[in-house]
Image: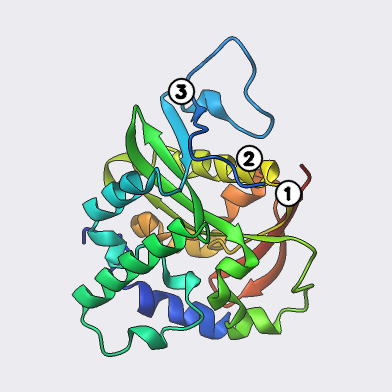
């Protein structure tokens, strides 16, 4: 996301894939300190100036603002896993791909088929965590490593947390951790279920530490802290982790 770690998103992700009650947008969670305790599962006090909102038609301008600042995050607009495959993008120039991704993302958001949490610092969008039901991310099911895993592929309600992005001015400040907690809170509010994540392993995270802003899947340690368990490996660098959340 040079400038953007997602500039090589397709080439970076293909090896992994080949080897591997809606909450109102108007409901904003405040991360300011108050006299009351924050909801269980949210570590609000660690980042007192942050707040979150759900991605929706109303908050689309904020999503657009965040991603536009970083070139649409390599032109992906967080659409990679929402497509069954990359066939529809063949033959397009980078500019054309970015434009199509943006238009298609907006269409999905307008149709309530693309979800995520936006993180703000005093009204300024600074971070993003994509989550949604299994059906929103068909490309994951088409990965060979995912298909080979001996796991229950269709639990009653399966959620996925696929991508994080943090504004370049706010990296290494715990933004992704706050966004993850907010996404888990949103899933709980929508009835809970089994949640999947695909983080970078400890070993790979150490090896790639100087490019830490490329870890759009998050890191293993982030999810361990939130009680996710490893259920399989997706290639040499990524894990499949799961946790069940009850409403």
The C terminus appears in which quarter of the rendering?
A: top right
Apparent side of residue 134 relative to residue 30 in the rendered image (left or right): right
Query: Residue 182, located in which quarter of the rendered image?
Result: top right
Q: Secondary structure at mark 2?
A: helix
| Residue 148 at x, y percent in the picture | 69, 84
Classify 189 as above or below 1. Answer: above
Q: CA distance from mark 1 to mark 3?
A: 26 Å
Number of residues whose C-alpha sits closer than 10 Å to that of mark 2, classed few (under 14), some (14–19) or many (20 or more):
some
Pointer 3: what residue?
Answer: 48
| Residue drawn at (50%, 51%) of the image | 116
Going from N to C along the chain, the mark reached first, 2 or 1, is 2
Q: CA distance from mark 2 to mark 1?
A: 9 Å
| Residue drawn at (46%, 48%) of the image | 55
Pointer 1: what residue?
Answer: 192
Q: Secondary structure at mark 3?
A: loop
Is residue 115 visible in the rendered image? The answer is: yes
Is residue 216 visible in the rendered image? The answer is: no
Instruction: Determine which of the numbered discs, if any, sits on residue 200 in the image.
Output: none
| Residue 187 at x, y percent in the picture | 65, 47
Q: CA distance from mark 3 to mark 2?
A: 17 Å
Pointer 2: what residue?
Answer: 185
Marks 3 and 2 close (CB-CB < 8 Å): no
Number of residues whose C-alpha sits closer than 10 Å to that of mark 3, classed few (under 14), some (14–19) or many (20 or more):
some
Classify 182 as above or below 222. Answer: above
Q: Nearer the viewer, mark 3 or mark 2?
A: 2
Q: Secondary structure at mark 1?
A: loop
């Amino acid at each position: 996301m040079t400038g953007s770690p997602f500039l090589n998103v397709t080439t970076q992700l293909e090896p992994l894939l080949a080897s591997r009650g809606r909450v109102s947008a108007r409901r904003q969670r405040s991360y300011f300190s108050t006299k009351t305790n924050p909801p269980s599962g949210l570590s609000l006090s660690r980042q007192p100036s942050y707040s979150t909102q759900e991605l929706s038609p109303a908050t689309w301008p904020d999503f657009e603002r965040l991603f536009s600042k970083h070139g649409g995050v390599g032109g992906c607009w967080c659409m990679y896993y929402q497509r069954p495959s990359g066939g529809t993008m063949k033959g397009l120039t980078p500019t054309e791909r970015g434009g199509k991704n943006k238009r298609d993302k907006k269409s999905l958001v307008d149709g309530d088929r693309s979800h995520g949490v936006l993180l703000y610092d005093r009204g300024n969008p600074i971070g993003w965590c994509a989550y949604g039901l299994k059906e929103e991310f068909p490309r994951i099911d088409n990965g060979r490593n995912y298909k080979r895993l001996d796991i229950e592929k269709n639990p009653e309600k399966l959620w996925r947390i696929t991508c994080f992005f943090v504004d370049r001015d706010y990296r290494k400040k715990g933004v992704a951790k706050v966004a993850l907690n907010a996404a888990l809170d949103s899933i709980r509010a929508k009835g809970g279920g089994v949640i999947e994540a695909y983080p970078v392993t400890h070993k790979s995270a150490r090896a790639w530490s100087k490019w830490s802003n490329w870890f759009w899947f998050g890191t293993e340690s982030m999810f361990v802290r939130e009680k996710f368990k490893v259920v399989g490996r997706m290639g040499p660098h990524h894990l499949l982790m799961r946790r069940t959340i009850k409403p």
